[in-house]
Image: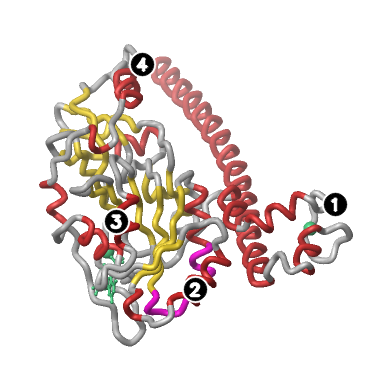
Amino acid sequence: MTDDLALLTPDLQSLGWDDELEEWASQAAQPSDPDGPTAPILSRGRIARTSRGFCLVFTGGEAVLAASSSVRSTTGLAPSTGDFVTVVEHPEDGPSIGQIAPRRTALSRRAPGRVPEPQILASNIDDIFVMHGLDRPLNLRRIERQLVISWDSGARPIILLTKADEVSHEDEAIASVQRAAPDVEIIATSTITGQGLDRVRELFTGTRTIALIGLSGIGKSTLVNELSDGVVQRTGEVRATDRRGRHTTVTRDLIPLPHGGIVIDTPGIREVGLWQSHMGLAKTFPEIAQAVENCRFADCEHQAEPGCAVSAARMDGLIEDRRLEHWQDLHAELKLQDEQLEDFSRRAESRSRADVQGRRDGERQKKRKSGKRRNSR
Ligand SMILES: Nc1nc2c(ncn2[C@@H]2O[C@H](COP(=O)(O)OP(=O)(O)OP(=O)(O)O)[C@@H](O)[C@H]2O)c(=O)[nH]1
Ligand SMILES: [Mg+2]
Ligand SMILES: [Zn+2]
């Protein structure tokens, strides 16, 4: 079951630790503040799982449970599954995450909640399998949204259409998904018949890291078990009535595979908020992004303005109406977020100015009081 993760003991090289990271870790070992307190570096490693303030870190031959709160409080950044880190030992508190190596890629979404902030789902990944079950109606909008965050991560998305054994004509589904994902490889898979699995296995080589994302119940953990020749992840039945999964996987887990490659299994996600992913949006809708470049006005809203290259491309049948509508929605979501962020940083600025003033007032008052006490003695 999932706790077997702590029993795995991959060495650092097979986790992707290389000379560049070694160089980084030896610099990280130098205290940034020579007078400040420093905890000795216990080990270096890669985060295999994150949950509630703790990380399971593969440190080469061992799995260490380390607190992550101290990093969060100093950098505001929570460690994520896939991070390369140093682990430090505090005499009283035990092991904790020391520093996080700069992420080569990071899959992030907007964290659930009102405050606009990012949440990293997986880092240092090479590919992302955007997974969709063929046992349910195709939801192209969901696929496109997941492609936006995937492209934006810097990794390469690949679409997996799972449970191909449950449908008779997957060709039609593949064709519509391909229209929604012009530059993306699509693989139809089945863990029952083995369809598509040779291609999937080919992609897992060496230290290549692949993250799996998609709704609950579409077979992410089943695929992990298939690739690892055994049961490492718990899987759950879907409800027969509406094909909904049961959210069986609850943590983001990094699992080195026995025949090479590393997989990151994630809990099913229904809502994916975008996080500042303008680049991902352009890569998901290349035909629209290209047309936008040629509009006469920089602030063209692509409605009926003169010289709108998007409208022209639409008339020529180069841009689908459905895609354009979705692009408009996602574009508006990102614009609104940019405004919210500006608003938040303005308010934070005035708050911190008020804080400084408050502290000064407090200090003045203290001085006055201690002056009075001295005088009254
Ligand atoms: N027919 C068929 N069923 C599959 C296939 N892959 C997975 N399943 C079934 O789908 C159900 C859900 O699989 P899981 O692997 O638990 O799904 P998951 O995506 O990990 O779900 P969460 O952990 O909840 O996010 C299980 O009953 C699997 O047996 C497949 O290729 N074909
Ligand atoms: Mg799962
Ligand atoms: Zn335009």
User: Where residue 295 sits: x, y (%)?
Assistant: 81, 53
Q: Which residue does the numbered mark 4 point to in the structure image?
A: 33
Q: Which label sits on residue 139?
A: 2
Q: Is residue 34 above or below residue 134?
A: above
Q: Which label sits on residue 296?
A: 1
Q: Classify mark 1 as within 8 Å of ligand 3 or not, answering yes or no.
A: yes
Q: Classify mark 3 as within 8 Å of ligand 2 or not, answering yes or no.
A: yes
Q: Nearer the viewer, residue 82 or 188?
A: 188
Q: Callout 2: few (<14), some (14-19), or many (20+) C-alpha neighbours within 10 Å?
A: few
Q: Earlier in the sequence, mark 2 or mark 3?
A: 2
Three-letter residue code for mark 4: Asp
Q: Earlier in the sequence, mark 3 or mark 1?
A: 3
Determine the residue positioned at 45% across, 50% down.
108
Q: Callout 4: few (<14), some (14-19), or many (20+) C-alpha neighbours within 10 Å?
A: few
Three-letter residue code for mark 3: Asp
Three-letter residue code for mark 1: Arg
User: Where residue 117 sits: x, y (%)?
Assistant: 48, 49
Q: Are marks 4 and 3 in contact (CB under 8 Å)?
A: no
How far apart are labels 2 and 3 at the CA level? Answer: 22 Å
Q: Secondary structure at mark 3?
A: strand
Q: Are marks 3 and 1 in contact (CB under 8 Å)?
A: no
Q: Which residue does the numbered mark 3 point to in the structure image?
A: 265
Task: Examine the image and state in which quarter residue 227 appears.
Answer: bottom left
Q: Earlier in the sequence, mark 4 or mark 3?
A: 4
Q: Nearer the viewer, residue 54 or 152?
A: 152
Number of the front mark, 2 or 4: 2
Q: Ligand 3 is in which quadrant of the figure?
A: bottom right
Number of the front mark, 1 or 4: 1
Q: Which residues are the magenta region?
A: 134-144
